[in-house]
Image (cartoon, rainbow, N blue to C red):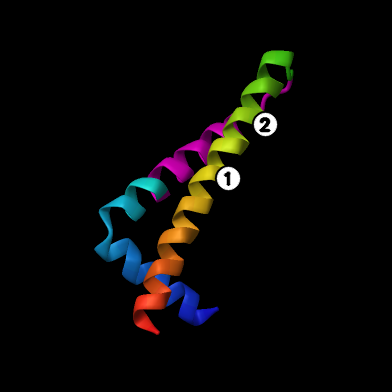
């Protein structure tokens, strides 16, 4: 796990694309937390929750692809 953290820190420091994706991922996470903290959850909220989760997953997949490319270059 330590190697993964080191790789992630290296890529975060060297890749503008990775930083942008990480920032977007964090923003979607914040939006999801705010949405899920609502006391009344509407149908529109459910649709938005689903959309945000899909966006977060898409971004995480892109980030993992970048990490995999960098892992191959280091190996």
Q: Residue 30, how many percent across, how many down?
A: 52, 38
The residue at which mark 2 appears reads as 36
> Viewed as shown, does residue 35 lie left or right of 6?
right
Q: Residues within 10 Å of mark 1 (few under 14, many from 20)?
A: few
Residue at 45% x, 38% y is: 27
Q: Position of residue 18 (x, y in %)?
A: 35, 54
- Residue shown at 46% from the left, 59% from the top: 65
Q: How many marks?
A: 2
Badge 1 element: helix
For discs 1 and 2, the disc positioned in front in the rendered view: 1
Quarter assignment of residue 40: top right
Relative placement, left or right, of 42 versus 56 is right
Can residue 27 be found in the magenta stretch?
Answer: yes
Q: Which residues are magenta?
A: 22-39
Magenta stretch: helix, strand or loop mostly: helix
Image point (35%, 77%), residue name: 73
Asked if residue 45 is positioned above or below residue 10 in the image, the reply reads above
Q: Mark 1 sits on what residue? A: 57
Residue 45 seen from this side: yes
Question: Is 31 part of what is drawn in magenta?
Answer: yes
User: In the figure, is residue 73 to the left or right of 57?
Assistant: left
Checking the image for residue 22, the label placed there is none
Give the answer, above or below, for where 35 lies relative to 10: above
Q: In 3D space, how far apart are the residues under numbered discs 1 and 2 (Cα atoms)?
A: 17 Å
Q: Position of residue 11 (x, y in %)?
A: 34, 66
Quarter the N terminus occupies: bottom right
Q: Secondary structure at mark 2?
A: helix
| First reached walking from the N terminus: tag 1 or tag 2 | 2
Is 42 located above or below residue 60 in the figure?
Answer: above
């Amino acid at each position: 796990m330590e190697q993964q953290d080191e790789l992630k820190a290296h890529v975060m420091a060297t890749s503008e694309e990775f930083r942008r994706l990480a920032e977007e991922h964090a923003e979607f996470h914040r939006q999801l937390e705010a949405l899920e903290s609502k006391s009344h959850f509407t149908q529109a909220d459910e649709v938005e929750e689903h959309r945000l989760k899909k966006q977060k997953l898409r971004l995480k997949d892109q980030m993992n692809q970048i990490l995999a490319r960098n892992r191959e270059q280091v190996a």
